[in-house]
Amino acid sequence: MTLKGVETIKVKVQVQITPGIPTFTIVGLADKTIAESKERVRGALTSIGLALPAKRILINLSPADLNKEGSHFDLPIACAILSNLGVLPEEAVHEYIILGELDLSGHILQVPGVLPAAMCAMSNNMGIICPNENGPEAIWSGNEDIIAAQNLLSLLNHFKGKLTIPQPIPSILAINDQELDFKDVKGHIFAKRATEVAAAGGHSMLMFGPPGAGKSMLAERIPGIMPQLSKEEILESSMIYSVAGLIKNGKLTTNRPFRSPHQSASMASIVGGGIGNKIKPGEISLAHNGILFLDELPEFPQTTIDALRQPLEKKEILISRASFHVTYPANFQLIAAMNPCKCGYLGDIAKQCTRAPTCGKTYMSKISGPILDRFHIHIEVCEPEYEDTPQKVETSETIKKRVLKARAIQNTRYNECQFSTNANAKNIEQYTQLDEEGAAILKQAVKNFRLSVRAHHTILKIARTIADLEESEHISKVHLSEALSYRLKEYSNFNN
């Protein structure tokens, strides 16, 4: 098999051994890694006492017009040769999708992409032969015919009936025991309320404020108040991690992804990419079903920031090359933080910015209006006064209970739709009937601040989430006013 994003494409490995000058040729648009497979296969067979015949060996990877890469072709090539020689039963091998890398001692090494391969095999009523280390990963596909072999010799003995390779045992990581708690955040009542609304409705959020005010501290604690991944979400996220080669020892996790790339990250590392056809998922795909946190947002390259526009709307990312394109899922929640200016103290009375207001305007010019408009919630995180910080604060567990109730309401509401949160709803007006007072407030805000159509819909989505947190079927003017407070800061702080 070969991968096109998280899509698995079956490849038939054909072998022909004929009299002639001894050669070993691999054809079918194979990359250099596969071309070198012949030496690894030769060494692996020699280590178990088998020698290649002194004949002309031709390996064809069909379909021939499909580019193929990866060391996982070692094992299927070896199995194809052994079946041609009569060492392996040919009919039995045809019932399996095979992948694995061989070392010179005959051991089968771990490779990426086993989980999507196992799911492809199950959908085609086939089994899968994979490395032993990938077995616990493959078993999560639901496929019951999995042969996770440690080495080539044990695989041969399994098919000869001399031993039976046991079914792998699924292993899964527990929830991170180092999960951060909101009880450590003192003060910031308004900011914590905003993060609760963001988590409950899946809304993107932009925080701005001076250095050290607590923006990163708040963002890092959001996964702790979000629902645990469902079985479907675990598989979706794990397939991406499998393709990226980030699953170790077959262990999946129930933790919401939280990706926080550095400001020096390249465009390819954020959106995905690679050399030739080796297009790997980027941070926005690795954050699928979780959070992508961009700290110091204006410090990222402007092209990288603007590249987030399409995946924020489409919930997927299309990476195109001249003759190849890959689509990765990218249903992530964007959380970003930034300072008001380069020095970070624009508008601070105690620590005045010496280059105001030019410093702030230059800094903000790196973020385009369309990107700002795609952030649902805009909040200012100020430094709390020491004497104003309360001694008793809510824990993440307490906040999470309210978030779970709001998410349950949304799951019921959008049960027959492709979206499950208010942030992703396409027909939000159907679920937000406003009374006269609420409609008048929203109309006035749209007129005064010249809100875009997207901003108008966003306010309705936030108001719907606030009402869900209070388990209210109707949206009152209080809910709408709070929703407006999360958006109008964008205009009062950035545009003035």
Image: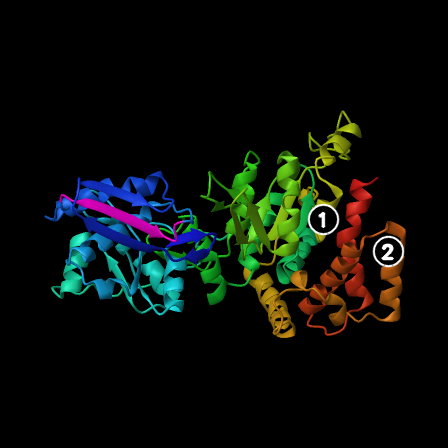
What count of labels does the image hold? 2
Residue occupied by mark 1? 379
Q: Residue at x 69, y 30 (%)?
A: 342
* Residue 42 appears anywhere in the view: yes
Q: Quadrant of residue 407?
A: bottom right
Q: Position of residue 107 (x, y in %)?
A: 21, 48
In this rendered view, identify the residue nearer to me: 335 or 195: 335
Name of the residue lying farthest toward the front:
20
Q: Position of residue 421 (x, y in %)?
A: 63, 64
Upstream in sequence: badge 2 or badge 1: 1
Q: Which region is colored magenta? A: 54-64
Viewport quadrant of the N terminus? bottom left
Tags 2 and 1 touching, CB below 8 Å: no
Residue occupied by mark 2? 445
Viewport quadrant of the C terminus? top right
The kind of residue tagged 2 is Ala
